[in-house]
Image (cartoon, helix red, strand yellow):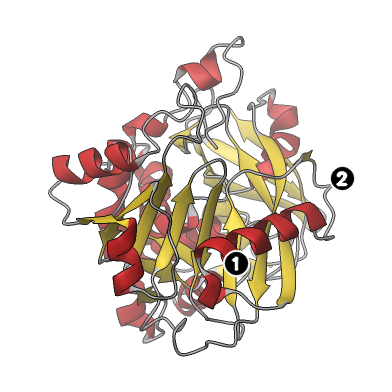
Amino acid sequence: MKTTFDTIVIGLGGLGAAALYWLSRELGADLLGIEQFEIGHTQGSSQDHSRIIRLAQHQDIYTDLARPAYAAWYEVEAESDVKLVHITGGLVIEEFGVRDTSRVGTRDLNGYRNAMTRRGIPFEALSAAEVNRRWPQFALKDNQAAVYQPDSGFVDAGKGVLTHLALARARGATLLDRTPVRAVAPRGQGSVDVETAQGVFHARAVVMATGIWTNRMLARAGVQLPLYGTQEQVTYFATPHLKECSPRHFPVWMFHGAHSFYGFPVYGELATKMGQHLAGPEVTPETRTFDPDPVREARYSDFLRAHIPRAYGPILLTKTCLYHNTPDQDFVIDTLPEYPQIAVTAAGGQGYKFAGVIGQALRDLALHRRSDLPIAPFTLRRPAFTDPNFGRIVHH
């Protein structure tokens, strides 16, 4: 097969598939995508049916990405005629008096309200009683309150990956799966060799959407980024109240209290879905397992019974996934300072809602080494990556 391309995208999960699609609109057949596992695999963090998408953010840097993210998804929907975004409305709920406020930063209702107000995003502030009246599936307590943002919903993650890849292939891109990359070897600052189990490929630029595997591929180039992995999980509850918990009647939700939980209406499985933000153990690709953590399953069950009882039911199944995390928990969307022909991204388990706009930014970086999209905060040239004493920030 052809071995020289303008650009090679490594990693065809959520972000890599989006980058491949947006690049294919410019490059056509002069584009190669490489995936170490099979297409649509469950080894990383882009599998399963649903990821929350929302304009409700508590930091301006993500609010500014949110609107173009929606626009990118709708453009892919229009080209494919595949429905990927499901608007349900969304609740952000806070339980007062139970959090370590020294650690939460702006991840509270004030943070969300302030960020949405600054950017002109409509929302409603609701008491617990108002939430319970509008959505009787909930049973919030007097020490809880919420904001409601009507544009929130979810993106079908697995379907989104396959749609991006199908459209890229239709535009001429070559997809190579089950092909581990052994090394990404830059040649000066003008080209890159990508060494794989099926030979060496050459490109003017490379996009790496490789998550926790990134450092292995960059080892020969002498680049190591302070990324780490955690094993997270979501559980599906077979609620008997299907209509009440359908996307037409039940919003996506997030809950910030002693723990940070999030959940979905019935979709993909005949069950509601719930997870917890950054609750899992630190792992590597070798040490991660696919075994559910019963402690978290019990925690989820207790929470649903107490706060959203109509969404509760027997556990149908639990799925694990592998997050990759940055020291400050913020995204990376940048070129390597040493090798500007290599664009990299890291967005943990929270990046899928932004996959389209991140894909557009990676396209810009690969083709032009710059982007007009609001990605400046996600540089590798910030203290989390330049200060060896930075440590880690964990917002639960």
Question: Whole-percent x and y of residue 168?
Answer: 48, 71
Residue 293 is at least partly visible in this image: no
Q: Is residue 62 above or below residue 157?
A: above
Q: Please say whether residue 8 is visible from this viewpoint.
A: yes
Q: Amino acid at mark 1?
A: Arg
Q: Looking at the image, is 126 positioned above or below residue 104?
A: below
From the image, which quarter does the C terminus lie in?
top right
Question: Does 307 sit above or below residue 81?
Answer: above
| The one of 186 and 70 positioned closer to us in this rendering | 70
Give the residue at mark 1.
305
Classify 242 as above or below 393. below
Where is residue 50? Give x, y as percent.
Answer: 52, 70
N-term mark: 2 or 1: 2
* Left or right: where 73 falls relative to 9: left
What secondary structure is marked by label 2?
loop
Relative side of 147 to 84, left or right: left
* Residue drawn at x 45%, y 26% as measured from the top left: 101
- Residue 311, how many percent across, how many down? 54, 75
- Read off the residue under disc 2: 287
Q: Disc 2 to disc 1, how far (Cα)?
A: 33 Å
Nearer to the camera, 242 or 53: 242
Q: Dot 2: few (<14), some (14–19), or many (≥20) neighbours within 10 Å?
A: few
